[in-house]
Image (tube, rainbow, N blue to C red):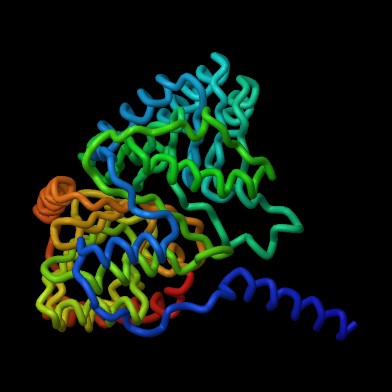
């Protein structure tokens, strides 16, 4: 009997360890600042190390908050003539969830091939009826890593990607989920602040390939041909890439992208991130950037946040950053769900990735990187507007916080590897 109990206990410990860790080796040493963002060496390195190369001829359009984001995405869906591929983490029941389901179903009934990939955990608040209606209309719907005995070892690996590709020609990515929290224009705590991006041009094929990565895992089926990968003409002047990151392959890709970008900074880093819980190497890289004279500014959520433990774990990492002169701002009006980085007024990275270990090593993520001074200037202006609605946390303020807060933050910091 005791042998059986010990065996069960050992199996549970092994299962927990399997879900809470990654077998991949992680980058532990500082990335040397060999070149500046925008240099040819930087562009070549980003393309070679992250997978797909940086390609010319793209156009990127940005949208702020649900009032702009959702109409643009729905208009694109309703314009589809051949295919729609859609992958998202959060899809909940509600007004906007119903509108997306109706638009996808209508296109499926019209003969468009519609493929919807939803994370099993992230869609926990979605009514089964909505899924049934889409499938009855002819859409293919797949849940990523549902709870099964043979997927238990992968339960902690979620797809956090947010991808929409229409006819293989127009793509969307960013921070927004399909839920009523994102409706409106961040006017109050019930309506979140977020950014999303539309891309046209050759890099859309990279976004489509990123969707196919998980679709093949889910359905063991390859979708290809002109309906999914048409010939793409130049649509604008931006150089861009869409790359993916997952524990199974290239788990360090998104973390490496951040580390390379920080190391390449010579003037200014703007980092807007909803879950900013840097590991020790990331902290050292940001401090090193300050020592090179780089101005580093970070916006994170304030009191309005959907996961308070993340905010506490984040604040437990701030002391060396504040001591080095990093500017940290907390957004005040509502939940701040943005995931945008701008480096030296030329390099922009947007997508699903948070600045935390869960995004770096546990989740499937995808980001759009863009080399474009006009887009960088636009996003810098958005960043400044968000700063205007934020409160700066100084080193003195941080040190004066109550002892109870310090204790809670230390405790939260102990589990930051899972946040």
Q: Which residue is rendered at x = 38% and y = 37% of the image?
A: 171
Residue 301, percent from left and from top? 26, 58
Quadrant of res 65: top left
Q: Can residue 112 be seen from the camera position used here?
A: yes
Q: Which residue is rendered at x = 29% and y = 45% of the image?
A: 56
Quadrant of res 286: bottom left
Question: Exactly how many numbered labels are in the figure?
Answer: 0
Q: Is residue 273 left or right of residue 6?
A: left
In the orientation shown, which residue stands out farthest toward the right?
1
Quadrant of res 265: bottom left
Residue 206, percent from left and from top? 44, 46
Q: Quadrant of the N terminus?
A: bottom right
Q: Can residue 302 be seen from the camera position used here?
A: no
User: From what the image shows, is residue 395 above or below residue 64?
Assistant: below
User: From what the image shows, is residue 77 above or below residue 55?
Assistant: above
Between residues 348 and 18, which one lies in front from this camera angle? 348
Residue 370, percent from left and from top? 27, 51
Residue 215, percent from left and from top? 59, 44
Q: Which residue is rendered at x = 28% and y = 40% of the image?
A: 57
User: From what the image shows, is residue 194 above or below residue 233?
Assistant: below
């Amino acid at each position: 009997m005791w042998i059986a109990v010990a065996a069960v206990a050992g199996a549970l410990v092994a299962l927990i360890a399997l879900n809470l860790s990654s077998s991949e080796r992680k980058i532990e040493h500082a990335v040397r600042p060999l070149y500046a963002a925008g240099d040819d060496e930087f562009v070549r390195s980003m393309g070679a190390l992250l997978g797909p190369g940086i390609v010319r001829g793209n156009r990127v359009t940005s949208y702020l908050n649900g009032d702009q984001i959702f109409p643009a995405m729905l208009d694109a869906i309703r314009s589809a003539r051949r295919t729609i591929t859609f992958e998202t983490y959060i899809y909940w029941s509600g007004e906007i969830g119903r509108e997306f389901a109706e638009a996808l179903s209508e296109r499926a009934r019209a003969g468009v091939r519609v493929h919807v990939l939803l994370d099993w955990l992230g869609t926990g608040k979605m009514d089964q009826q909505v899924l049934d209606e889409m499938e009855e209309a002819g859409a293919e719907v797949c849940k990523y890593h549902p709870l099964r005995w043979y997927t238990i070892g992968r339960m902690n690996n979620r797809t956090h990607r947010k991808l929409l590709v229409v006819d293989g020609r127009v793509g969307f990515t960013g921070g927004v989920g399909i839920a009523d929290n994102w409706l409106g224009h961040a006017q109050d705590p019930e309506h979140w602040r977020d950014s999303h991006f539309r891309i046209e041009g050759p890099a859309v094929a990279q976004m489509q390939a990123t969707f196919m990565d998980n679709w093949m895992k889910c359905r063991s089926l390859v979708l290809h041909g002109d309906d999914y990968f048409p010939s793409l003409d130049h649509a604008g002047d931006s150089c861009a890439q869409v790359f993916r990151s997952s524990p199974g392959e290239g788990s360090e890709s998104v973390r490496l992208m951040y580390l390379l970008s920080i190391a390449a900074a010579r003037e200014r880093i703007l980092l807007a991130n909803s879950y900013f819980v840097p590991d020790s190497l990331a902290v050292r890289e940001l401090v090193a950037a300050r020592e090179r004279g780089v101005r580093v500014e970070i916006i994170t959520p304030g009191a309005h946040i959907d996961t308070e433990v993340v905010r506490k774990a984040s604040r437990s990492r701030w002391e060396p950053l504040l001591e080095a002169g990093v500017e940290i701002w907390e957004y005040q009006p509502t939940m701040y769900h943005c995931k945008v980085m701008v480096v030296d007024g030329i390099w922009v990275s947007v997508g699903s990735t948070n600045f935390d270990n869960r995004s770096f090593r546990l989740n499937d993520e995808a980001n759009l990187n863009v080399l474009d001074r006009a887009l960088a200037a636009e996003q810098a202006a958005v960043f400044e507007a968000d700063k205007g609605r934020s409160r700066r946390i100084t080193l003195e303020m941080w040190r004066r916080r109550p002892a109870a807060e310090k204790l809670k933050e230390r405790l939260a910091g102990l589990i930051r590897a899972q946040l």
